[in-house]
Amino acid sequence: MSSLAQTSLALPLPPHPSTPTTTTTLFNALTSSTTFTHLKQVHAQILRRSNLDYGSNSLLLQLVLSSFALSPSLEYAVSVFSQIPRLDTRLCNNLMRELSRGADPERTLLVYERMRREGLAVDSFSFPPLLKAVSRTSALVEGMEIHGLASKLGFYSDPFLQTGLVGMYAACGQIMEAKLVFDKMSHRDVVTWSIMINGYYQSGLFDDVLQLFDEMKASNVEADEILLSTVVSACARSRKLSYGKTIHEFITKNDIVVDPHLQSALVTMYASCGSMEFAQELFNKMSPKNLIASTAMVSAYSKFGRVEDARMIFNQMVEKDLIFWSAMISGYAESDHPQEALKLFSEMQVLEIKPDQVTMLSVISACAHLGSLDQAKWIHLYVDRNGFGGALPVSNALIDMYAKCGSLERARWVFEKMPRKDIISWTTMISAFAMHGDASNALSFFYQMTEQKIEPNAVTFVGVLYACSHAGLVEEGRKIFSSMINEHKITPKHEHYGCMVDLFGRANLLREALEITETMPLAPNVVIWGSLMAACRVHGETELGEFAAKQLLEIEPEHDGALVVLSNIYAKERRWEDVGEVRRLMKHKGISKEMGCSRIELNNEVHEFLMADRNHKQADRIYEKLDEVVSELKLVGYAPNTCSVLVDLEEEEKKEAILWHSEKLALCYGLMSDRKESCIRIVKNLRICEDCHAFMKLVSKVYGREIVIRDRTRFHHYKNGVCSCNDYW
């Protein structure tokens, strides 16, 4: 430790002899001072009239004590303290108590150091402020030394000291040491229990919080509102709804005053556990509604997809802090409302609310979901201008954003410019290549990473296996799957088995796909059966496809995709009665096929199209353009492929239905744009159909335009009549 800083306050005046009468007068002046200015004037008189003779030490001691109340900071008291030649334990204890509460608690330890250096006695009143300072500064080594001294001097049995030690060890992250002291205490009041319980909470040991609270109740110690708030918060963090309800009943039964802090904890607990009816009921009773509870409600509603309810609460709050804004933006980003997230972020800019890294990660995620490259470029510029670019998580998110916005080149540029890369950086880049069908680079980066001794994790292998699956690299996929288990000692999860089923299924190795499904050590889930079902649909294996669909429906009876596939299988075989049965079932249960939706960005505005959409303000022109494009393509051999229209319609009706798919409407709107040289980028929520895929290839050749489409599973880059997927998707 360094010694106390010396800040001289002496005035350049010659000292005058001091007398008992003068000392008494000055002492009375000190104790009666009401302003800091008056106090400094008396200090000047002390310096003039006393030359460290009779009474000067006691005057300086009193000056320190008086300055606690009148000085705007503790600097003055510390400076005077440094000039006192003969210290007093009582004064040191008082100074340490004030310093331990102040902005610089580490100075408490400097006072203690001087006391020890000058051989001044420490008493039972010295230890509480010392332990408080240690707790606030996490100075564990000094805390252990103080613990040892207290034991040596025989103060260890003092309950105040023991409580301070429990708090000190808990604050320094030594929760087991805190528990050892706690267990040895002969008397534990509510303060001690609260400190120990809060220590468990801060350490993330939420189950221990609840267990200790039960022990406290068994000891007949009554809990206060602060302790109950901690216990309720532990229920929220550990999702223990039943225990939380029990605590709430205990509070009500015992007429415990529910202060705003406890009320917020209860609202947060119910919201975190998904019990929104109880959460809303309590929230409605809050007046005024605070930001903690409001943020919890917004986050919970967003988590359960109820963003309208979340926004209603958001709009009700007049005062909003950054955490509240971030919660709402995150809610939109994670609830398939990326445009609303970006709109809210723009509102933040107007109000000059500076975002933090958490906010930016949600904004980047929203942009990635939206798939808007122009927005992505603007957000990247904002990130760099506002100092977020150096953060590793932000750079990793930018890679993902550019990849999902269709620019693999920019994603790679961000990756190459990063001064430091972690496993997430490499995995994100590998997954980006996989998503775009660039298996060659995905594998190259994977092997580069392992050569640099960066150990791949389970997510990395999902990306690599996905790349193999979408490129038909069966043997490479087998080899990597084997190395994951045997060399890297990673136990496969559902995602890895799903990739292998998909790999074999796409390659028409359906027997091997089924074998993995039946022999894997985990019970096949919706993803596994879904992959097998999709492969059977592509390769026309109706019997196995029907089996896979039924297995999937055993797990998730209302899975719309499986019901649609089952209906389509029956339709292909013209089993119209079975089709009708499936459709009636879907109607009875209120299940509908997810509607195709495509987005295209032009002139910084995102335009959305549904199948056969007529809502766009230029709808007439778009359909005219579609007729024109179809006529041009027919000249080079295009004929609508109606095989994917699996409903009982006339052939001409099927042709109309296939031509009105949302991605074709979005494409025609893009072709109407004046930006002839630009790439047309479209984002679709479903897998692109065979007809639209062939349509896009021909348009890229006939109109000389590059087209990039992101569908549910991957990217398709169309150029000069060829797709990057090589028709393997």
Image (cartoon, rainbow, N blue to C red):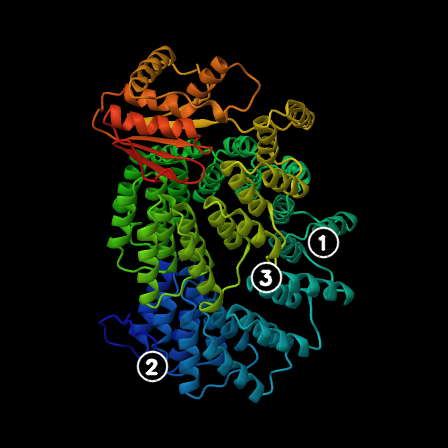
| Amino acid on which the number 1 mark rests in the picture | Tyr
Residue mark closest to the camera, 1 vs 3: 1
Residue type at mark 3 is: Tyr
Q: Is residue 80 left or right of residue 486?
A: left
For label 1, count other residues whose C-alpha is less than 10 Å away and answer few (under 14), some (14-19) or many (20+).
Answer: some
The local secondary structure at tag 1 comes to helix
Quadrant location of the C terminus in the rendered image = top left
Looking at the rendered image, the disc whose residue lies closer to the viewer, 1 or 2, is 1
Q: Is residue 718 left or right of residue 148?
A: left
Q: Residues within 10 Å of mark 3 (few under 14, many from 20)?
A: many
Q: Is residue 263 above or below residue 235?
A: above
Q: Which mark is residue 52?
A: 2
| Mark sitting on residue 243 | 1
Element type where label 2 sits in the image? loop
Residue linked to disc 3: 201
Specify whether 541 is left or right of 423.
Answer: right
Quadrant assignment for the N terminus: bottom left
Say above or below: 666 vs 353.
Answer: above
- Disc 1 to disc 3, C-alpha distance: 16 Å
Q: Residue at x 43, y 48 (%)?
A: 469
Give the mark nearer the N terminus: 3 vs 2.
2
